[in-house]
Amino acid sequence: MLKSILSTISVLLAVAGLASAGVVNTTNATASLLEVQANNVGITGGFLVVGTTAASDAALSDPTLAQDALADFTQFGGSTTFGTPGVGGNAGFFSLAANGDGGSAAFSGNQIYLIGGNGSDIASSSYLFIVRSDATFGPDLPLFSGSVNIGVDNTLLGAVGGTNGLNGGDAFQMEAIGGIIPEPAVSILALFSVGLLVLRRRR
């Protein structure tokens, strides 16, 4: 089963690379099988894109800032979702060959990023992961080809953890983004403070 998935993906990526001058390949259906999860559950649907951004590593690594920091994100080529037929319909797995002009002003010389989320795009996601390659986009001389992958390149948001549902190996957890959820003790103190204010006003 695994060999069949890996073989199919290799062929699809090779064909996609020939179909257009520039291509960035990414997949997690490799020997490491890092299934992407949100709160320990494999993702189905969601989105995955490659592209570039001028945001700092510090902003992209902060779950309270990352979504806003990606406002300038420029997508390269098409997108995909988790659990497509190309990866055997397995939740948490993906394969994408994004085609475009790596030599255009929007990309040339800029670092390659991979972003995945549980929504239909960055803005609608409550969980994200961000991976940055040290490689950069470039012109076709004669062919631009790059890759960026979880578990290989620089993980800015998200982390290896949990157990994948395919073979019991490691999984990769997306990060919950947005506001920080307070600890229970902090929440109780906040409610207590509000109660005191209400009592004080009644007096």
Image (spheres, rainbow, N blue to C red):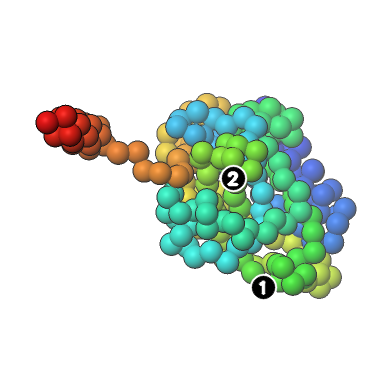
Figure quadrant of residue 188: top left
Name the disc covering residue 172, or none.
Answer: none
Q: Nearer the viewer, mark 2 or mark 1?
A: 2
Q: Give the percent coordinates (x, y) of residue 32.
A: 54, 41
Q: Is residue 77 left or right of residue 18?
A: left
* Label whose residue precedes the other's in the sequence (2 or 1): 1
**195 or 1, nearer to the observer:** 195
Q: Give the percent coordinates (x, y) of residue 41.
A: 50, 28
Which residue is found at the position 16% from the left and 29% from the top? 202
Name the disc covering residue 123, or none.
Answer: 2
Assign the N terminus to one quadrant of the image: top right
Q: Is residue 92 visible?
A: yes
Mark 1: amino acid: Gly
Q: Is residue 56 above or below residue 155?
A: below
Which residue is found at the position 45% from the left and 54% from the top? 65
Q: Is residue 135 left or right of residue 182?
A: right
Mark 2: amino acid: Ala
Which structural element holds mark 1?
A: loop
**157 or 197, nearer to the observer:** 197
Considering every residue shown, the one lying at the far right of the view is 19
Which structural element holds mark 2?
A: loop
**197 or 1, nearer to the observer:** 197
Structural distance between the alpha carbons of marks 2 and 1? 26 Å
Name the disc covering residue 109, or none.
Answer: 1
Which residue is found at the position 86% from the left and 57% from the top? 20
Considering every residue shown, the one lying at the far front of the view is 203
Q: Give the percent coordinates (x, y) of residue 33.
A: 56, 38
Which residue is found at the position 82% from the left and 49% from the top? 16
Q: Is residue 32 above or below residue 163?
A: below
Assign the C terminus to one quadrant of the image: top left
